[in-house]
Image: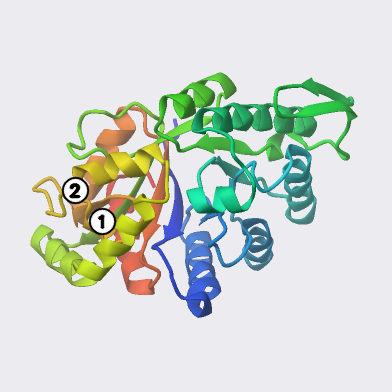
Amino acid sequence: MTPPRLRVFPAISRNRDPQKYIGELMRVAEFADRNGFEGILLFEGNDVFVEPWAMAQHIMAATTRSSPLIAVNPVYMHPFTAAKFVSSLAQLHGRKVYLNMITGTAVSDLQGLGDDQSHADRYIRLGEFVGLMRQLLASPRPVNFAGRFYRARHLQLRPRLPPELMPEFLIAGQSEAAQRVAKETGCIKMQMLPPDLDRGLDAPGMNFGIFAREGREEARQAAKLRFRDNPDDRELLVLTMENTDSVWKRHLYAGQSGELGDNGYWLLPFLTFQADCPYLVGSYQEIGAKLKDFAAKGLTTIMLDMVADETEMQHVCKALAASGMF
């Protein structure tokens, strides 16, 4: 019997330099393609330098097996448009993609776009988006759909997508509305790495970063050199927190501790606006053992924050390999 395998989607640590953005994404995407990662996470939002669908095409043209995880927010497109992109990439490259379904962006961006839906209503819209998109991709006949936010009458996508190229949908929200929609639509539910590492794991997907070295103390010292505490960076996060209604961001922010825990949990990269998630810091064997424990509790999918240089990515690969599940 083939042992279970973790699907890992790397994402580059927060990048504020448009001159380096594409190069870093391609460096991680090509590394991921060579080293058995499933694909690469591509963000969406007003402040993202390259539209994720365009970046996905660029990556798939330059790789041999990558299946990008593309963020999709209904505020930016219709379900038919998203389905058309999925179909087009499948025809061009013969590969599936994964879709990270989101509702969040900065409150000021939503206002600028004229979207005044409540947090709860944005998730109702997201559920309808997933439902209509799935029907369009799978149905051999024209689709009729009557929802609160979307309506379709005899709408058909050609050609029909082969079953093996159907996308998988993920939902990363932590609110009750997000979890309800994930359950109703059968999307893969994501969560943030919990501080205690051992309790609170109730989703098949998890979002965190890895910082690893051969030994525990070496990893901790190197992590503190890479992600330095800085009052200016902390102030950047404070400003973004004033401009978001994201439940998971507020939940992380409420913790506030930037101390590196004995168990390897570290929130400082998030608190200093250098990453969008907590980090797990430790030796290859420590992190490998934790990943194996997570998988035993149902973890199948990881959104993995990564520093986009070759040395750090190699360290991450060694930690993943130590789990025996990658």
Left or right of residue 229, residue 85 in this image? right
**Callout 2–callout 1 Cβ contact below 8 Å:** yes
Query: What label does residue 63 carry, if any?
Result: none
Residue 149: x and y in percent read: 70, 29
Residue at position x 27%, y 59% in the image: 269
Identify the image quadrant of the N terminus: top left
For the residue pair 53 and 64, the one nearer the viewer reads as: 53
Query: Can residue 293 be seen at all in this image of the molecule?
Result: yes
Query: Can residue 140 be seen at all in this image of the molecule?
Result: no
As helix, strand or loop, the secondary structure at mark 1 comes to: helix
Q: CA distance from mark 2 to mark 1?
A: 7 Å
Query: Residue 202 is drawn in which quadrant?
Result: top left
Query: What label does residue 271 carry, if any?
Result: 1
Residue type, label 1: Leu
Where is 123 relative to 17, above or below?
above
Where is 183 relative to 10, above or below?
above
Residue at position x 21%, y 28% in the image: 199
Marked residue nearer the N-terminal end (2 or 1): 2
Residue type, label 2: Gln
For the residue pair 163 and 11, the one nearer the viewer reads as: 11
How packed is label 1: few (under 14 Cα within 10 Å), some, or many (20 or more)? many
Residue 281: x and y in percent read: 20, 55
Q: Which residue is situated farthest in the bottom direction here?
A: 19
Where is 31 relative to 304, above or below?
below
Left or right of residue 138, residue 12 in this image? left
Q: Which residue is mark 2?
A: 256
Residue 82: x and y in percent read: 72, 44
Left or right of residue 162, residue 173 in this image? left
